[in-house]
C-alpha cells in the first residue's frame, strides 16, 4: 500500500493540478525531482483517478488538467519530431558517406599544372581563357622539363592523347601543362589549367564535414562544385 501511495504521489507531482499536489503534500521541489514519468497512459490514469476521487460538492477545477494535457501532447509531439529529425540526419550522413566512397579511384578537376599519364589512356584538361584573349597555346613537358608537344587552343577544353610532336606514344609518368595567351591588344598572359587528380580516399564527418582526399591537392569538401571524371 505504501508503494502505491508513493507512486500516486509521484504521479501527482508530474501531472496533478496545484490543488491535488497540495492535498497530497507534494511540493514544487519534489515535483521537479520526480519529473521522470513520460507516458501518456499514466497521465490519463491519474486524470481518471482524480475525477473518481474528487468531492462531488466541491469538484476540482479541470482547466489546469486540460492545459497540462495539452502541454503534454505538445512535448510528446516535439520529442517525436526531434527523434525523426535525428534519424533523418543519420540517414543522410550514411547516404553521403556511401556516395562519397564510390568516388574513390575516380578523378576530379582541380586547378593545377601537372597530371599523371597512364598507359593506354589520355588526359583531358580545361584552360581558363578570358574573353579578351585572341589566341592561346598549350605546352606539355616531361618530368625533366623537356617540351614534348605543343598545341594551339581553339576552345577551353582539350584532350591530349599522350603522344609527342612526332606522333609517338610517350611513356607513363607525370607531365606538366603550361598555357599562355595573347590579348587583342598584344599583351601576353599566363593561363590557368584544370587537370584531373585522383581521389584516394574519403574523410567522413571530419571537422569540415565529408571531404575527398585528392592526390597532390589535399582535402576537398564534398559540398564544393566538383566535376568528376572517370
Image (cartoon, helix red, strand yellow):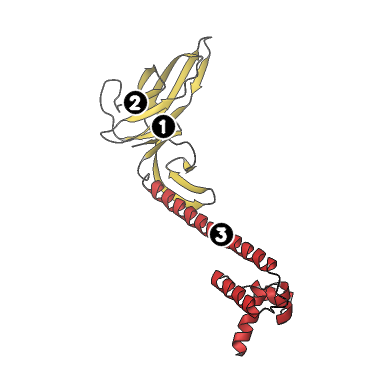
In-front residue for pair 79/105: 79
Q: Nearer the viewer, mark 1 or mark 3?
A: 3
Q: Residue at x 73, y 80 (%)?
A: 23
Residue 129, above or below 122: above
Quarter of image, res 159: top left
Q: Is residue 63 left or right of residue 141?
A: right
Outermost residue to the front: 57
Structural crowding at the residue carrying mark 3, measured as other residues with C-alpha within 10 Å and reported as few (<14), some (14–19) or many (≥20)? few
Give the residue number, with chain letter if any, for mark 3. Answer: 77
Give the residue number, with chain letter if any, for mark 1. Answer: 195
Quarter of image, res 166: top left
Cα–Cα gap, marks 3 and 2: 58 Å
Structural crowding at the residue carrying mark 1, measured as other residues with C-alpha within 10 Å and reported as few (<14), some (14–19) or many (≥20)? many
Tag 1 secondary structure? strand
The answer to whether the residues at label 1 and label 3 have Cβ atoms under 8 Å apart is no
Structural crowding at the residue carrying mark 2, measured as other residues with C-alpha within 10 Å and reported as few (<14), some (14–19) or many (≥20)? few
Q: Is residue 151 left or right of residue 22?
A: left
Residue 143 position within the rendered picture, expressed as x and y whole percent measured from the top left:
38, 33
Residue 173, above or below 154: below
Cα–Cα gap, marks 1 and 3: 52 Å
Residue 161 position within the rendered picture, expressed as x and y whole percent measured from the top left:
30, 27
Give the residue number, with chain letter if any, for mark 2. Answer: 159
Amino acid at each position: 500500500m505504501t508503494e502505491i501511495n508513493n507512486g500516486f504521489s509521484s504521479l501527482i507531482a508530474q501531472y496533478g493540478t496545484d490543488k491535488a499536489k497540495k492535498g497530497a503534500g507534494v511540493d514544487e521541489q519534489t515535483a521537479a525531482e520526480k519529473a521522470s514519468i513520460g507516458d501518456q497512459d499514466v497521465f490519463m490514469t491519474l486524470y481518471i483517478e482524480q475525477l473518481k476521487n474528487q468531492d462531488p460538492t466541491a469538484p476540482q477545477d479541470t482547466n489546469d488538467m486540460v492545459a497540462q494535457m495539452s502541454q503534454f501532447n505538445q512535448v510528446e509531439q516535439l520529442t517525436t519530431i526531434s527523434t525523426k529529425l535525428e534519424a533523418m540526419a543519420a540517414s543522410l550522413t550514411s547516404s553521403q558517406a556511401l556516395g562519397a566512397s564510390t568516388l574513390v579511384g575516380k578523378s576530379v578537376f582541380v586547378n593545377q599544372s601537372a597530371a599523371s599519364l597512364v598507359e593506354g589512356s589520355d588526359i583531358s584538361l580545361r584552360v581558363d581563357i578570358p574573353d579578351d584573349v585572341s589566341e592561346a597555346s598549350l605546352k606539355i613537358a616531361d618530368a625533366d622539363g623537356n617540351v614534348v608537344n605543343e598545341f594551339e587552343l581553339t576552345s577551353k577544353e582539350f584532350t591530349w592523347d599522350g603522344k609527342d610532336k612526332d606522333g609517338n606514344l610517350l611513356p607513363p609518368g607525370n607531365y606538366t601543362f603550361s598555357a599562355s595567351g595573347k590579348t587583342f591588344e598584344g599583351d601576353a598572359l599566363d593561363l590557368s589549367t584544370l587537370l584531373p587528380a585522383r581521389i584516394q580516399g574519403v574523410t567522413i564527418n571530419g571537422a569540415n564535414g565529408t571531404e575527398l582526399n585528392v592526390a597532390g591537392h589535399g582535402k576537398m569538401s564534398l559540398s564544393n562544385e566538383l566535376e568528376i571524371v572517370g
